[in-house]
Structures are given as structure tokens and as C-alpha cells.
Image (cartoon, rainbow, N blue to C red):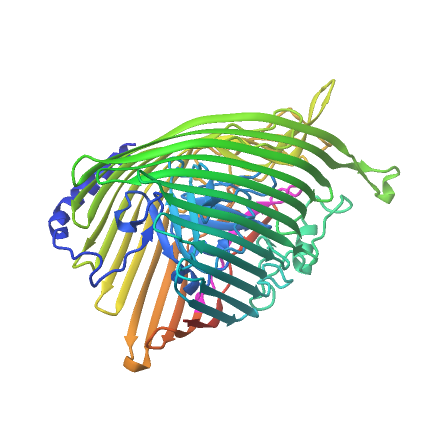
Amino acid sequence: MRNLLLAGAALVAWQMPLAARAQDVAPSDEVGLADIVVTAQRREEILQRAAIAVSAVTGASIEAQSVTQATDLTRLVPALQVAPASSFTQIYLRGVGTFGANAWAEQGVAFNYGGVYLSRPAAPAGLFYDLERLEVLKGPQGTLYGRNATGGALNVIPAAPDVGEFGASLTAEYGDYETLKASGALNIPLGEAAAFRLSAQTAQHDGYFNDGYDDEDTQAVRGQFRLQPNDAWDITIGADYAHVGGQGSGGTIMPLLFGDGDDRLGPSDPAVAAAYLGRPPTAPVPQIVARDDGYQDNEFFGVQADVETDLGFAKLTLIPAWRRTDLDFLGYASSFLIDVAELSEQSSFEARLSNNGDRLNWVLGAYYFDETVDANQFFNQASNATLILSDLNTESTAVFGQATLSLTDAFRITGGVRWTSDNKRQSTYTETRPFVGFVAPPTNFTPIILVIPATSTSDVDFEKTTWKAGIEYDIGPQSLLYASVATGFKSGILYASTGRNYSNPEELTAYTIGSKNRFLDNNLQLNVEAFYWDYKDQQVSHLGPVQVAQTPGGPIYGPVFLTENAGAATVYGTEIELLWRVGPHGLLSANVQYLNSEYDSFRYQAYSTSGATPVIGCAVTPTTLTGASPTARIFNVDCTGQPLTNAPEWVLNAGYEHTFDLGAGGRIIAAVDTRVEAERFLSIDYLPQGTQDSYMMSNLRVTWENEPGQVSITGFVNNIENELVFSNSFQSPVKSGVIYNQLRPPRVFGARLGLRF
């Protein structure tokens, strides 16, 4: 807290001499930097006037960066880290997130599509085309949103139908790794009061690993109908479908990464398989051998409506939605077989009343969410396997509200409150299958696999009231100073166990002070934010011991990927954003984040099937708990003092774009950008092999477009340095110290054609 107050004092001191200059800034609608309109506070406002910690990326920028899947978003926002985990997506903001890898997982950072919360970690797929913008909200959300979140929220907002206007666009891209991407949109007016918009995308490339893994094969389509019969009504009904195929994500054993040339050796490469089989315990202990038969056959469906009507005293917004996620995938990215079939359906309904008055802006809302998940999950390491068959249900209700009162023309106060009640239920059948020895005589080495069945049931409730308070002050026509305190909560997570089988909720209190400014006749933008987060009862997901049986001698524990309250942490830092229009044709951008994170306490238990002491970069001590096989051992782990995972101390995103005017011949736009990161830990093992060292990754684009801007041709290179960057890390459950890492894309280049009418 002391550091935050010092940062705030410095921010105010820095602000005072600039305030006088801000008086002469030109209005935002004159020549200079363009404005981005956001709806992060449930009302349309210019991003520079939003008194919250939010970053926004336009749909045009997302297209220019060739973003077609959630994992690509890391390149866009310094505070954000997005990583794959088989078919799941793991989102971290400033170190707060979830290592989600099974049917129980819930994101610590909410993912909202078109105003609808998507619960499944696999759900952010096949959505990144024909977008209006992406909003990244940092810190707890809930007093304005249907579903609460601790770490923040990602709002993906598709382009809406444009009533009364005809429009069409097509983008086609080809590059190495046989990359072929295409997306398009068609906006058809239906009279003067309605329109239909049809959008579609296909994205394919060969695997970045030499055995075909880390490929992409996505097809998606979205249809929206919008009706505006009069000034009082605005109704949009949409449906979307996506299919994600291919072999899926891959990983490679550390430190073996490359074969001949720059070939990335995938999990089924003979050299990787041999390295794995050569690590203890070796044969005749049963071994898993990764193959190249991995696949994804995942489907995503969604239907939603957005109904807005003016009641006179307030605007009423109704958002009913239904989504279905049907997963079927198999892979070996983490060194062992993962075979999952999961069907989930979610229904949600959000209702909001809002009013923007001269002195008072307020929002009052109610939210209902219901989800069922039917999951068949098989995790096989040969000498240990787990089969999990689950029926899961989550039901959530909430009421929320927030109001901003203008005490003067320049000074405003904000207050908000939220009440959330969650009920979670499960009926789960589990088989733990440990290797316990060989059939006598041992010379034939026929393994004995013990099957330990267990049934887990849960019916638990979680209830919490969270709040927000803030102030904001206009110290100039285009200079805003703001401060806030907000609390966030995420309800407990279930897992399979015959004993206690759920975690407690996690909580986060965020203190924020910031300033947003425009100077030099609207050509220079400088935003600064200082933050301090108090993170309690953090939910950590990992492979650990759970009770699978009860005997007269005591409970028996087996390994399951569980979520437990393992840590309390302090996170603080500063983010600075610079945007400078350099002359009439240049644009310089820089966004830097300093992040200090440290666990005040972090303790959990690790399961060793071989009995060997786990290889972990923290203090490890044995326990007397009984494992599921004669060799298994369970250990206490203490990582107090370590930083949060996926929380680099420094991140810099910088770029420069220059336009060369060719008159009637159109224009050439050259752009270069880079991301520089300090080192970060990828997992709670805190090992050198699971650490991403500091790196710099840059991209280059050169575009010609005709004078009306209807036709464009772009050549691009991403990851110019061909930097090797890890996105995830996982230690083998049966071979201590054997680490498999997943990788971000290598250098890729290509060309893109754009048509807009």
C-alpha cells in the first residue's frame, strides 16, 4: 500500500505542471489522434474519458496483426498472457489467471463475447473475425457486469449490422507453413429499419512442430439481424458456429527442442520419444509413447439477443443467450495421453436499467447463469492413469449496480455494489489406475495395474458481496485524474475426491490511481496507471493428492488435477501508455508495464507416483499420507516468496507506423512493432526448464492501398528474430524433472489482400 501511495503522490506531482498545457488542447474531433469509443462502463464513451484501467484494440488492428485465435492476443496488450493447454485457453492478466486443464476449470479473467460471458476455457475459439474492438479491463469486475471476475475481463465485440447501409469486405492471406486465412462480411440493408450481417472465417496452417502438432484448422460463421423500428427500440439477434480441427497443440521435452535445421521436434518425434523413455523410471515400468494421432474435433454454437428500449426515465437492456461447447480431442502436449469428450451447455439472462443524466449516471442489473457439463476425461501416463466421468452443474444469480455522481462540472464520485450467489453440484465417477508391480515370476514383466474406483458428489453454495468506490477529476479539457478501490471474488472450484472436493473462493482487492491526457493539439497521448492488488486465497490448479478411498488404516490418496487455495500474494506496479502523432504521416506508440508480484504465502501438496522427491524449485518435505501404490509418496511444497506465474517484471510493446502519400496512386503504410519481456515462470514448479527468459519479438508490415482505401495489399513478417518463446510448461506426473514446454509461433511471413466496399 505504501508503494501505491508513493506512486499516486508522484503521479499527482507529475500532473500539475502539465495541467496548464492541457487547457489548450484541441478537441478530439479535430486533426490529431483518433478516438476509440468503448462500452466498458456499460455506456458509450471515449476511451480517454473512461475512468478505469482499460485497454482497447480496434478490429482493424486485430486484422492487421493476423489474430485468428485467443493465443494471438498476447502480442497486443502488455498486461496480457494467453497460452494454450490442449484445446483449452489460459488467460492471465498481471499474473492473475487459471491453469485450466479439465472440465472443472473456470477462468480467473472473464471472457465476454458480445456481452455474454463464456464459461468454458475452450470457448474463446472461432470468434476473432469481423470485430468492432477488443476491450481488456484490468482488475475486479462485477458492479457493471453479469458475471463477476477477479483478475479482469476480455470483452470481444463483433461488428454489428449497419442499418440502412450496404457493405462488404474480404480479407485473404497466404503465408509459409501453408497458411491460408480468409474472412469476410456482408452487410445487407432490409429497408430503412433493419439489416442483416453475415460474417465468416477460415484459418489454416500446417503444424509448427515437425510431427504436425501446433497447426490450425478453424472454420466459423456468424449471422446477425438488427431491427430499429423507431428511436426507442434497437434489437439485435445473432447466431454463431465454429469448428476447430487439426492435430491440436504440441509440446517438446526440455532441453531437446530442435532437430535438423530449425525443425521443432514434436512430442511424437523419435528423438523426443527416446529422450522421454530414457528418463527414469524406465522400462520395464510401463511407458507411454506419444504418437502423431492427436486430433481436435471441437464445435461451438451460440445464440443470443440484445434488446434495448428507451423507457423515458432509463434504458432497458435485455441479453438472453444460449451456448453449447462440444469438445472431442486427443493429444500428448504434456508428455502423456489426454483424451477428452466434453459437452457443455450454458444459458444466461442479463437485464439492465441505465440512465445517463446531466449529473447522475447509473446502472442497475440482474443476472442469471446456468451451466451443465457432461465430461469423459482420460489421462494416461502408462504407470498411472485416471478416468473421470463427470456430470457438473453451476447455477449463479446476481444483482449489481453502479452510479457516478457529478458533484461539480469537473469532479465526480462513483460507487457500486454486487451480490453473487453460486451453487455448484457434481456427480463424478473416478478410476485411479496405478502401476503396483509385476505378475510373478518377475521375468515376464507383466505389469499389474490396480483399479481404484471412487464416487464424488458435491452440492455447495458460495455467496459474496463485492463493491467499488472511485473518484475522478477533470484537471483540464483533455486531462483526467482518477482513483478507485474495487473488490472481486471467484467462487470455489470443484474437483474429484471422496473427501473434501472443492476449494474456497478467491478474493482480490485492487487499488488504482491513474491519469489520461492529450497534449500538443491532440497529437500526444500519455496515460499512466499505478496499481496495488491484494490477492487472497488464490485458487491454484495443479496435479496433487486427493482422497480416493477410505480404509481402516486411513485414507488413500491418488493424483488428480485439482484446484486448491494455495496462496496469498501482493501485486503492484505501473503501466504507461504513449501515443504520438509524429507529423501528418507518422504514429509512434509505446506501452510499458512494470509488475512486482510476490507470494506472501504459497503452500500446496505434490504427488510422486515413483516415490522420488519432486523436482521443484521450492522447499519440499515428505508427509506420512498414503498413496495409491506402494511406491507413491506425497510431499508438502512451500513456494512462499516466489513471484506469480506468467507475471514478467517488465513488458514493453512499442511500434511505429508511417504513411507515404502517393496522391492518386494511393498510399503506402509501413509499420513495425515489437514486444520485449523480462523473464517469467511458466508453472508453479519454478524450474529453469519452465522459465521463459527475457526476449524481444518484432513484426513488420508494408501495405499499399488505393486512394479510396477499398483495395489493399500487405506483406508481413511476424517474429522477425525467429525468437523461441515458451507459452506453457508442464512436468511429467510419473517422471520427476521431465519438463514439456509449449511454444509460441516461429518466424512466419506472408501476404494479405483486402477488399472493402
- Residue 30 magenta-highlighted: no
User: Overall secondary structure of the magenta stretch?
Assistant: loop
Question: Up-down: is 688 above or below 3?
Answer: below
For residue 205, which quarter of the picture? bottom right
For the point 41% across and 42% down, which residue is it? 317
Q: Locate residue 597, reporting x and y percent.
A: 39, 39
Residue placed furthest toward the top:
552
User: Does any portion of residue 513 appear in the rendered image?
Assistant: yes
In this rendering, would 286 be left or right of 308?
A: right
Which of 449/522 is in front?
522
Q: Nearer the viewer, residue 569 or 620?
A: 569
733 within the magenta span: yes
Q: 65 or 191: nearer the eye?
A: 191
Give the residue at x 40% y 63%: 698
Q: Which residues are magenta?
A: 717-737
Q: Residue at x 73, y 35 (%)?
A: 431
Tell me if residue 256 comes above or below residue 487 in the rendering.
below
Give the farthest residue toward the right: 441
The answer to whether 335 is drawn above or below residue 149 in the figure is: below
Q: Position of residue 285 (x, y in %)?
A: 76, 43
Relative to 154, is 274 on the left or the right?
A: right
